[in-house]
Amino acid sequence: MMITEALRLQSQGSKHLHFLIDVNDEQIIYSNQSFINQFSDIKNPAALLPYIENEDLKYVMEKYLACKSGEKVEDFESRVYIDGKRHVYKIAAALLIISTGQHIVGCDAEDITDLKDYINVLNEHNKKKNSILNIVSHDLMGPIGIIQSLSGLLNDPEKKTDEQRLYQYIDLINRTSKKCIALIRNFINQEFLESSGVSVVKKKSN
């Protein structure tokens, strides 16, 4: 299968992994430089299987067979291990049938490892934040209930409150309010520390 020079140049300059598989011969007949950098000059598609996470193998094979039968496969993910390091690839593939009758599966794989790791960090951070919010809201229910009860007593025109008891109520409201403020401040401080621990993914854009 001939690849036009324009398409070849575009593919060679891409960070995505591009490769073409001849379905009849089960051979990789083209791979761009990004693919070669990761997997060398592999020609047999079966040689890629040991790189794939065991739990993902069945899923990947199902997608490949579906593509061979003519189904367009878009944006499925697979974990791949290269030199002991885990990568996550988002893969799209389509069956191409050329005039000679040759069946070609064209594949595009994008490394989304950094994005997935960043999303996982954010999810963990959100779980911790929600847990802290539940604790704080639970701890605030008691003090706020006390303040509401005391405020109700002070505002009840039918109940006379002597000066000493009035000062006791005000003092209790004051101390309870400070406790609420302390809880909120502790939460904010904890939230700040957790947020500062979230790593930021920085990628150079060409």
Image (spheres, grey):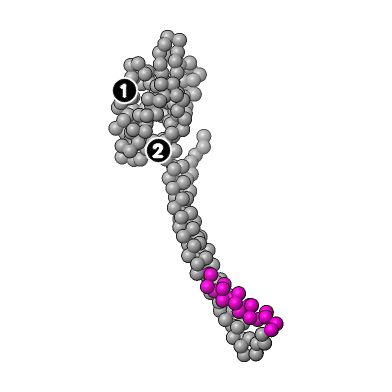
For label 2, count other residues whose C-alpha is less than 10 Å away and answer few (under 14), some (14-19) or many (20+). Answer: many
Query: Would residue 83 be visible to someone looking at this image?
Result: no
The secondary structure that most of the magenta stretch takes on is helix
* Farthest-out residue, right: 157
Q: Which residue is mark 2?
A: 88
Residue 90, quarter of the rendered image: top left
Label 1 is placed on what type of residue?
Asn
Of the image marks 1 and 2, the number of the one nearer the N terminus:
1
Dot 1 alpha-carbon crowd within 10 angstroms: few under 14, some 14 to 19, many 20 or more? few
- Label 1's element? loop
Residue picked out by circle 1:
44
Residue 171: horizontal and vertical position, in percent? 59, 83
In this view of the protein, which residue sits in the foreground, 56 or 185?
56
Residue at image point 37% right, 25% down: 65
**The magenta segment:** 140-158
Picture coordinates of residue 133 (x, y %)? 50, 62
**Magenta span has 156?**
yes
Position above or below: 138 against 151:
above
Badge 2 marks a residue whose secondary structure is strand
Q: Position of residue 101 (x, y in %)?
A: 42, 11
Residue extending furthest toward the top? 100
